[in-house]
Amino acid sequence: MNKSFRQGQILKIIREKEIFTQDELARELAKAGIPATQVTLSRDMRELGLVKTGTGYQQFAERTGPELAEVAREFLLDIRIAQNLVVLRTSPGNANSLAIAIDKEELVEVTGTVAGDDTVLVVTPENRTAENFRKRMLAFITS
């Protein structure tokens, strides 16, 4: 299991559940088939900027980079839907910036993104969610 994947799973777990101890976190990781020692968890938690709060561990890291609305207004040229997939066209070389901005928003309607040079493929859970995401993106460029 690589470090990036393990740390991604740690973030996923603390977003979905209230985790108060490293033992609890280790048990949740083990359920996902990811073994981790206490030393490894301590290092991962420090690197991820996790802080213990009254509601469990949380990540307190500053957001960096431009906001989604700003990136969409600047680079988004076209939006198309194919069932639960949304295809976003950008000017050449700007798809990655748009995909990063979408990913940072952690939108419930977005399962994931894949970026090329001028195209971002956004995967949504279902067709209706794709339409909701399309409307959200259109609102950014029409406002």
Image (cartoon, rainbow, N blue to C red):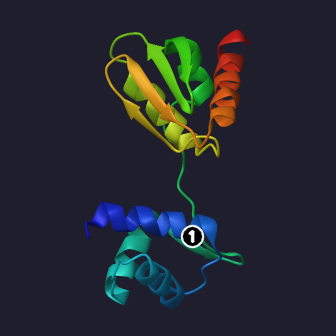
Residue depicted at x 44% and y 73%: 45
Q: In x, y percent, where is residue 58?
A: 59, 68
Q: In x, y percent, where is residue 69?
A: 62, 24
Query: Would you say 102 lies left or right of 54 here?
Result: left
Residue depicted at x 49% and y 20%: 88
- Quadrant containing the C terminus is top right
Secondary structure of the residue carrying numbered label 1: helix
Q: Quadrant of residue 113?
A: top left
Residue depicted at x 42% and y 71%: 46
Q: In which quarter of the image is residue 115?
A: top left
- Asked if 102 appears above or below 45 in the picture, the reply is above
Q: Which of 115 and 49 is in front in this view?
A: 115
- Asked if 52 appears above or below 103 in the picture, the reply is below
Q: In x, y percent, where is residue 31?
A: 45, 81
- Asked if 88 appears above or below 27 in the picture, the reply is above
Q: Residues within 10 Å of mark 1 (few under 14, many from 20)?
A: some
Which residue position holds label 1? 14
Q: Which amino acid does label 1 sit on?
A: Ile
Query: Would you say 127 lies left or right of 77 here?
Result: right
Query: Would you say 47 lies left or right of 138 here?
Result: left
Residue depicted at x 41% and y 83%: 30
Q: In x, y percent, where is residue 89?
A: 46, 14
Q: Nearer the viewer, residue 63 or 25?
A: 25
Could you tell me how many numbered marks the image carries? 1
- Asked if 62 appears above or below 132 in the picture, the reply is below
- Quadrant containing the N terminus is bottom left
